[in-house]
Image (spheres, rainbow, N blue to C red):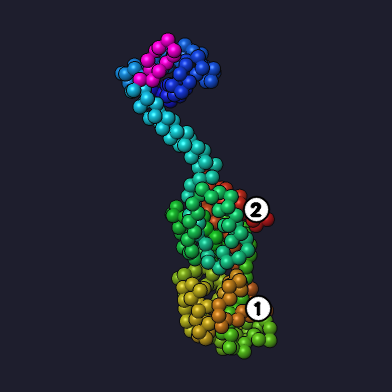
Amino acid sequence: MELRHLRYFIAVAELRSVRAASEQLHVTQPAISRQVQSLEEAIGVALFERTPRGLVLTPAGEAYLAEAREILARVDAANRLARQIASGLHGNLRVGFVENAAWSGVVSRALREFEQAVPDVRLELLPMNTPEQLESIAEGRLNGGFCYRVGMLPEGIASMPVLEQNVVLAVPEAWPLGKAGAVVAAALRDTPFIVFPRRVYPAYYDRLLAACAERGLTLDIRQEASTETAILSLVSAGMGAAIVNAANRDRPPARVRFVDLQDLSVPLPLEFCFGESETNPALKRFVDQLRKAAS
């Protein structure tokens, strides 16, 4: 049995005429008659009574018609769904992000516009630091992620640039440090600092300390915290200063003041990273949407 058997049967049943079904389907009457007879032979019952006034469904035919319509409706729905998935209009997308990257600007705009453009793609957003995202992308647990890239990307991972941030000094609001404006690194020699543990992001940790050393500053590290949110909470509590991503200016914590670093720079390029072998069609649509938002 093939789907055309059902389509021909439904047309004849609804129009009560092989001739009318032939005109509607643009198929010859003998061909439709043969397919309907073949269907009846296959299931072993008569679906129509042949009367002088035309074809009339038997009770078995009435029941079969309802089921045939349901079958074709499901097939048509499956066809539509497959086409939508293949074109990136339906499906699931798991995207990681560093929290401060999504507070404003191009990332938040791209996420909002993507959800508006393709509401049938379920976008699951997972906050992670950059090393966690890269590991998850490599292992196939994320389709992509917004990462601050420091150093080379792991093999098999591609990226597209989104924007570039730099670092800024965060100090407790009550401190006099920096109230007159930007500070130089040498002015921070006796300042207690809060930093990431090196294990969280070794490449960034080493880059930061090297940049400080180039300006004659060895950080006096008093506390460590695994996220910038935690670091800034300790700054807010007066535990020390921190050198953090300038994106944090978009959501300044209470009792924290940001101060420009006059001679210290650690570029933080934000990139959208994804596996080179990634085949999810929704990812391509997401990258296209992100590229528009970033342009």
Q: Residue at x 52, y 41 (%)?
A: 84
Looking at the image, which residue is at 48% across and 40% down? 81
Q: CA distance from mark 1 to mark 2?
A: 31 Å
> Amino acid type of disc 2?
Lys
Q: Give the residue drawn at x 44%, y 12%.
A: 53
Q: Where does the C terminus fall, quadrant-wise?
A: bottom right
Return the x and y of residue 181 as percentages of the image width and height: 68, 83
What residue occupies the far left of the structure in this picture?
Answer: 44
User: Label 1 amino acid?
Assistant: Asp
- For the image, the number of numbered tags is 2
Q: Position of residue 114 (x, y in %)?
A: 57, 53
Mark 1–mark 2 CB contact (< 8 Å): no
Q: Which residue is mark 2?
A: 292
Q: Quadrant of residue 47?
A: top left
Camera-side residue of 225 and 8: 8
Q: Is residue 274 above or below residue 30?
A: below
Drawn side of residue 46 relative to residue 181, left or right = left
**Which residues are the magenta region?**
48-58
Please state which of the two labelled residues, at mark 1 or mark 2, is closer to the viewer: 2
Question: Is there any visible trace of residue 253 in the rendered image?
Answer: yes
Residue hosting label 1: 260
Most foreground residue, 234 or 169:
234
Image vertical order of residue 251 relative to residue 32, above or below: below
